[in-house]
Image: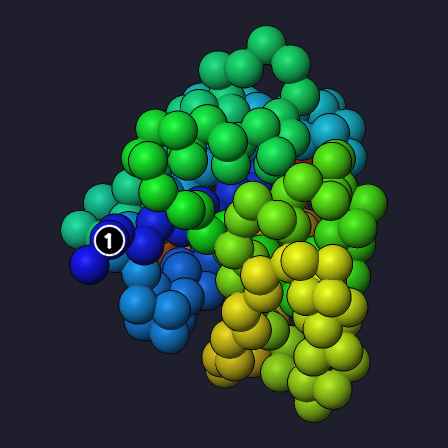
Amino acid sequence: MADKIAIFGGSFNPIHNGHIRVAEYALKECGLSKIIFLPNATPPHKNKAEIISAEHRFNMVALAIENNISFEISDYEMILDAPSYTINTIRHFKKLFGADIFFIIGADSLYTLNKWKQYNDLVNECFFIVADRNCSDGSNLLKEAQNHQKKGGKIKLIKMPKIDITSSFIRDKLSKGEDVSKYLPEKVNDYIIKNGLYKNNPEE
């Protein structure tokens, strides 16, 4: 049986327990053999000044996943000289592994997928795993998935317990000096404290 490899991209600013739970559910529900966490360097839709250094974000992801043998991390997008686009990333990893690639996104991203670079090529080259983190009734999400499927998209919806954690929520608390340890892997929380991160970090 061929390996089923998924990419989980994002700014991870910072990575938190919600990200880990999404990955764990995707791994189980989709029978994946491996998930590669892919911290962005300069996401095309975000202001670079709003995100802490790629090095810090990479280090935190590495700490968060180090005890799960099914999780890996890649610096592929971090070391690019230009903004990273999903279509290029998918083609890179398809060539690297010689296999189809899955890509994990949140339900909110499915509604804007048609605006992603080279959308028509992307939905035909990649299997999308969509995590419904807000536990919606599913009807609107299913309809949106079907719209993409009509255009050749390969979409897998996964249900999971509601996740109320966001990176912006954590950054806001940290900027106020509040404790966020219950939202983060222990080593990530320790890393943030040790390096004095997010004390004056602006909102996304």
Quadrant housing residue 190: top left
Q: Nearer the viewer, residue 71 or 195?
A: 71
What colouring method underlies this structural image? rainbow
Image vertical order of residue 39 relative to residue 18, above or below: above
Query: Residue 37's spot in the image, x, y percent?
Result: 41, 42
Q: Residues within 10 Å of mark 1 (few under 14, many from 20)?
A: few
Residue 95 in view in this figure: yes
Position of residue 97 in the picture relative to residue 111 (left or right): left
- Disc 1: which residue: 2
Residue 105 image offset from top left, x and y in percent: 58, 56
Seen at 67% across and 58% down, the residue is 152
Q: Is residue 179 above or below residue 140?
A: above
Q: Amino acid at mark 1?
A: Ala
Residue toward you, 38 or 52: 38
Direction from residue 119 to residue 199 in the image, left or right: left
Q: Quadrant for the C terminus, please.
A: top right
